[in-house]
Image: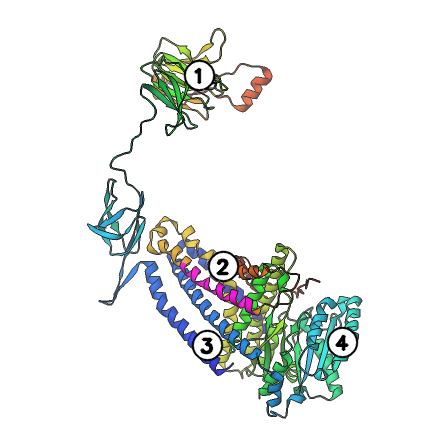
């Protein structure tokens, strides 16, 4: 037990240590070996330009796939599928869990209305609204009212109250979702529905699914012979209030959507993120979402991965679920809100010690697979934490600290021009982002002026500034906290939609 | 993931990986100053020469051979060694120097000034100029036999300020007051002040400047300075330092501040601090005579002035031995 604790601490320290060792090492070397740092900076800049080129290409591939699959009639395709594993289209039930804290009806009603617009038969759809008991009676009354208004449209509408302070739980969304799933299990058991026949989706309170979502999900579930060994991941976009959000928030959220689209093209690294779906059988077998970790959306994937000895995958679905942009009325509170949200996402670095501990206790996963997955997760968080700092702050250091002798060397002389050229090349990505923004934006609301379209395009010119300020800092913050054992608490991103 | 997407992704990945592998040595070798000799398949070190001249656009010759670029230019991939650099432009004197180009280093020749072969000269104003003074605010004052004139620095807006024409032939020095509203000039025995604000609102033909003799002495003058506040001037002769009052309706106050033991050398006056430095013969601790550097603080310290004002005490100019 003591040994496990020690190993866990070591794994918690590793990501932050690597990040700080890199940054401090480069800072020190900029004084003592500026030529080494200059060579590293040019190599990194080139790597970053080509990586950006590669990822932009994947983004275009993903968009192409999204465009193709948007035209599909998923229900028709479901019906055309032959029975697989004893399941046909008519056997599949969808359960949607909304873990909610203080989100009011103005947030939840559109999300439930989106379910009502789904092209899937509502008599095979179950809604679970799990409200935190600590949110108070007002939140509970709102939830009950929502059930009264919408229950008639679904097979069943469960409203439940997640008690505060259950043993082993901390105040995280996963604990609430797990409570809702357990209540759902009672209902499914009472109805005598097989767990394999239920596909459960865990949605944030502000998640509005596309009408095709459940048809698409049913198709992928039915078409997959190993359906219980997979999670199903839609593309999260932040369209609910994007026309009213601040440009900094729009850039960051659109960037996140683009990254998720890119991830759909890298299935071997793909991990569930935010709103996702899975077989209820799987959820029950692995013991539901984690009740003591913040990043429940990705930890559930690793939980399944370990439970099934590495035989678990994420199936990308080219269908969108729309959420709220974390924004405020003014720019500075928006930056703070975005920073906190990204830091919570970056806290996903807690997956690394979780996974490593799981690997240590599991001898049935091939070593190669363990190394690959561990490096994937480590590399993604490490890169997130260092890249913006290297590109914006470390790059000029050799010139500042290198002294006159360094500036007389060819590399000292060429460093600014080479870096600037590579930076300009990476800006080509901005053109693709501008184009993609226009393709993915929802229709302009009537209260928004037409010239806002121009702002939506040109906002990307701010991206170097946004990258410099909130590109890497949330990740450094999260990794440092984990390294020092100052664990984060779940902070709900307050939804602020224009009424 | 569709097989077709898998293939596309693999192509994109290997293309980008290959691009990185190809570009990295090229970019790094360029940045580090290396050059690839494709004929002999070897890498050799080069240096960079940066040439910048004023005016720009000059031709560059390396060991007698004209280089394609004109200044400012960065000439790369030069083999290490000494090069005879000539920078030339038509109508200017050429610049030439032997410069060593070192491996992986930058040699800079960036402070080259090319002087025109025929300097352009312009006549400012009419003839008969005895002397002139240039103020700090961009005016030229002409002391002419026909009067005192003023123009801008390019000779434009010429205007006669006064009919005064009795300028001495041997003016030793001139100095503008810090306020630029008057200037003094002196010969070896006399000092005059030209008051430029004499009659600012003068109509056409009226005098706008006034010339006044403010000091006349027996001993040869070596320097004249404006006392801080410009109500006095400090006149340094070969015998003493005197303070002469400028504005006086009756007798002009002239005070001898210090009498030299011998003719001073190396006179220096710092306008900002009001310190006057000079050398004089003095007696040391061992009672032997020697030449010392002295300093007189002509400008009062702020608190001294305040103190003087409160007690209505006369200003005191102390001096100290350095």
Q: Secondary structure at mark 2?
A: helix
Badges 4 and 2: C-beta atoms under 8 Å apart?
Answer: no
Name the residue carrying label 4: A150
In front of the other: A410 or B156: B156
Q: CA distance from mark 4 to mark 2?
A: 49 Å
Of marks 1 and 2, the one in the foreground: 1
Of marks 4 and 2, the one in the foreground: 4
**Residue B7 location in percent, x, y?**
45, 80
Most extreme residue toward the top is: B250
In the rendered structure, which segment of residues is drawn in magenta? A421-439
Residue at the spot 42% in from the left edge and 27% down from the top edge: B136
Mark count: 4
Q: Quadrant of residue A145?
A: bottom right
Q: Quadrant of residue A149?
A: bottom right
Q: Main secondary structure of the magenta part?
A: helix
Q: CA distance from mark 3 to mark 1?
A: 90 Å
Number of the label disc, if any, that sits on residue A389: 2
Number of the label disc, if any, that sits on residue B181: none
Marks 3 and 1 on same chain:
yes
Q: Secondary structure at mark 4?
A: helix
Question: In the rendered view of the protein, which quadrant contains the N terminus of chain A?
Answer: bottom right
Marks 4 and 1 on same chain:
no
Question: In the rendered view of the protein, which quadrant contains the C terminus of chain A?
Answer: bottom right
Name the residue carrying label 3: B9
Marks 3 and 4 on same chain:
no
Q: CA distance from mark 2 to mark 3?
A: 29 Å
Q: Is residue A93 above or below residue A22?
A: below
Q: Is residue A484 visible?
A: no
Name the residue carrying label 1: B205
Q: Is residue A335 above or below residue A235?
A: above
**Label 2: chain?**
A
């Amino acid at each position: 037990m003591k040994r496990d604790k020690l190993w866990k601490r070591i794994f918690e320290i590793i990501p932050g240590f690597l990040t700080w060792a890199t940054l401090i090492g480069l800072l020190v070397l900029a004084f003592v070996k500026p030529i080494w740092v200059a060579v590293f900076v040019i190599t990194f800049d080139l790597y970053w330009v080509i990586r950006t080129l590669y990822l932009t290409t994947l983004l275009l591939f993903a968009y192409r796939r999204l465009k193709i699959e948007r035209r599909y009639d998923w229900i028709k395709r479901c019906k055309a599928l032959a029975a697989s594993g004893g399941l046909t289209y008519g056997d599949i039930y969808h359960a949607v869990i909304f873990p909610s804290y203080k989100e009011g009806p103005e947030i939840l009603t559109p999300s439930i209305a989106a379910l009502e617009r789904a092209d899937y038969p509502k008599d095979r759809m179950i809604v679970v609204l799990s409200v935190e008991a600590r949110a108070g009676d007002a939140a509970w009354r709102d939830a009950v009212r929502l059930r009264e208004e919408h229950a008639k449209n679904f097979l069943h509408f469960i409203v439940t109250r997640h008690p505060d302070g259950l043993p082993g739980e901390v105040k995280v969304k996963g604990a609430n979702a797990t409570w809702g799933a357990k209540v759902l299990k009672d209902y499914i058991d009472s109805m005598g529905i097989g767990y394999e026949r239920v596909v459960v989706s865990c949605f944030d309170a502000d998640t509005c699914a596309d009408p095709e979502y459940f048809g698409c999900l049913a198709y992928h579930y039915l078409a997959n012979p190993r359906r219980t060994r997979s999670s199903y991941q839609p593309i999260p976009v932040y369209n609910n209030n994007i026309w009213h959000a601040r440009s900094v928030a729009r850039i960051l959220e659109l960037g996140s959507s683009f990254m998720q689209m890119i991830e759909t093209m890298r299935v071997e690294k793909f991990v569930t993120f935010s709103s996702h779906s899975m077989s209820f059988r799987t959820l029950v077998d692995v013991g539901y979402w984690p009740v003591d970790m913040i990043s429940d959306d990705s930890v559930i994937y690793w939980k399944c991965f370990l439970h099934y000895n590495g035989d678990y995958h994420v199936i990308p679905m080219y269908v969108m679920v729309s959420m709220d942009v974390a924004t405020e009325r003014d720019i500075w509170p928006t930056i703070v809100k975005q920073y906190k949200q990204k830091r919570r996402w970056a806290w996903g670095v807690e997956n690394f010690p979780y996974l490593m501990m799981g690997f240590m206790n599991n001898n049935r996963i091939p070593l190669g697979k363990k190394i690959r997955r561990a490096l994937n997760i480590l590399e993604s968080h490490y890169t997130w934490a260092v890249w913006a700092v290297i590109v914006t702050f470390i790059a000029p250091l050799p010139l500042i600290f290198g002294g006159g002798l360094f500036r007389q060397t060819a590399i000292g002389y060429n460093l600014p021009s080479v870096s600037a050229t590579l930076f300009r090349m990476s800006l080509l990505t901005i053109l693709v982002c501008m184009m993609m923004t226009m393709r993915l934006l929802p229709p302009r609301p009537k209260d928004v002026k037409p010239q806002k379209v121009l702002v939506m395009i040109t906002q990307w010119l701010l991206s170097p500034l946004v990258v410099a300020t909130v590109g890497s800092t949330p990740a450094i913050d999260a990794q440092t906290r984990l390294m020092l054992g100052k664990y984060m608490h779940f902070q709900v991103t307050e939804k602020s939609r224009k009424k | 993931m569709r097989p077709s997407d898998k293939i596309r992704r693999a192509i994109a990945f290997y293309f980008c990986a290959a691009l990185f592998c190809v570009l990295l040595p090229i970019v790094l070798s360029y940045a580090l100053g290396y050059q690839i000799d494709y004929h002999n398949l070897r890498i050799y070190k080069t240096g960079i020469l940066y040439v910048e001249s004023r005016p720009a656009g000059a031709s560059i010759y390396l060991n007698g051979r004209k280089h394609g670029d004109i200044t400012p230019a960065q000439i790369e991939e030069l083999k290490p060694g000494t090069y005879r650099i000539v920078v030339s432009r038509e109508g200017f004197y050429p610049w030439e120097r032997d410069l060593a180009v070192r491996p992986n280093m930058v040699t800079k020749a960036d402070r080259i000034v090319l002087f025109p072969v025929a300097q352009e000269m312009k006549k400012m104003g009419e003839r008969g100029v005895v002397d002139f003074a240039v103020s700090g605010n961009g005016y030229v004052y002409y002391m002419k036999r026909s009067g005192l004139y003023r123009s801008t620095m390019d000779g434009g807006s010429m205007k006669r300020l006064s009919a005064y024409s009795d300028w001495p032939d041997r003016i030793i020095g001139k100095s503008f007051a810090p306020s630029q509203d008057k200037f003094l000039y002196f010969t070896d025995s006399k000092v005059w002040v030209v008051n430029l604000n004499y009659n600012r609102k003068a109509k056409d033909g009226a005098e706008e400047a006034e010339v006044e003799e403010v000091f006349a002495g027996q001993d040869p003058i070596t320097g004249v300075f404006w006392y801080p506040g410009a109500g006095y001037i400090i006149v340094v002769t070969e015998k003493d330092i005197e303070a002469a009052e400028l504005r006086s309706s009756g007798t002009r106050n002239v005070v001898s501040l210090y009498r030299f033991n011998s003719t001073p050398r190396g006179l220096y006056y710092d306008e900002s601090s009001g310190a006057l430095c000079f050398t004089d013969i003095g007696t040391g601790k061992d009672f032997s005579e020697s030449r010392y550097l002295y300093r007189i603080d002509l400008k009062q310290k702020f608190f001294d002035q305040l103190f003087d004002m409160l007690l209505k005490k006369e200003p005191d100019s102390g001096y100290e031995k350095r």
